Image (cartoon, rainbow, N blue to C red):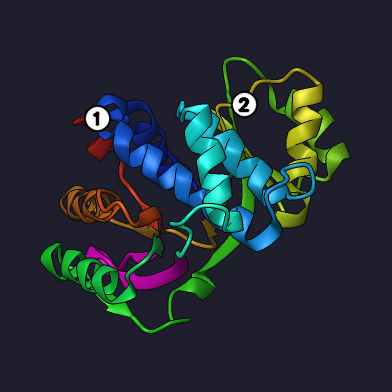
Amino acid sequence: MAGHSKWANIQHRKGRQDAKRAKFFTKAAKDIILAAKAGGGNPEDNSTLRLAIQKAKAVNLPKDKIENAIKKGTGELAGGDLTEILYEGYGPGGVAMLVDVVSDNKNRIVAEVRHAFGKHGGNMAEAGSVSYMFNKKGVIVFNKEKYSEDDLMEVGLDAGAEDIVDDDESFTVLTEPGDFMTVQQAFTDAKMEFESAEMSQVPENLVPVDVATGKKVMNLFEALEDNDDVQKVYINADFPDELFEEE
């Protein structure tokens, strides 16, 4: 998982947060709308909404925008007519990709996603032909300089964590979806600070790519993520170390 995580970590650090703040805000608000639409507007009773609000606060989404997004989801305000869609495809080198989309216009977004794949050497695939290569997991990432694996095991495994993975610069705690909030709360109660916590699609296996192919995969990844309707892109590429030495 290390090659995949290294790319994810670089994206996290690079961030381009100032340039992309509007996109982060839009995506965070959509997560809240969907969560409130599915499970109601009370985060105490809706763990998905609670997580969406937590992620929104992490990107500094203003409180009034969070409240408005909840109201859109519950129907108190207009603008909650959104649909979540998972597109599947292959990037350069046969890398599997899942594209998590939230949109109010299915025809437009499918055309945009297909265009991005085609422009960057990939192609879209039929539903189910790629998603079986991934497993939905809770993913909690910790700085390796702050905590040892034993520290994380002591708290995480007792709370129901499934595994702890050494990802070179960090430790990644994996959970089943139903245990995610419980495990996250256990770390919070233990005053152990994590770098990120989210539900994710974790690849079962990684596809090795060379530097040239890796660059093409990155370009496709970024083209998809730049779309306001794309919430998250998941890939199963195993990137070579040399690729990141050039960053």
**Residue 18 position in % (x across, y down):** 27, 25
**Residue 31 position in % (x across, y down):** 51, 50
Mark 2 secondary-structure assignment: loop
**Residue 122 position in % (x across, y down):** 21, 69
Magenta span:
83-101
- Magenta stretch secondary structure, dominant: strand
**Residue 141 position in % (x across, y down):** 58, 33
Q: Residues within 10 Å of mark 2 (few under 14, many from 20)?
A: some
| Residue 99 belongs to the span the image colors magenta | yes
> Depth check: 64 or 149 in front?
64
Res. 191 mark: none
Tell me which residue sits at (71%, 20%) in the image: 192
Indicate the amino acid at tag 2: Phe
Tell me which residue sits at (72%, 48%) in the image: 47
| Residue furthest to the right | 158
Tell me which residue sits at (47%, 66%) in the image: 84
Q: Which residue is mark 2?
A: 194
Indicate the amino acid at tag 1: Glu
Q: Which residue is mark 1?
A: 245
User: Quick one: quadrant of the C terminus?
Assistant: top left
Q: Are marks 2 and 1 in contact (CB under 8 Å)?
A: no
Tell me which residue sits at (51%, 52%) in the image: 77
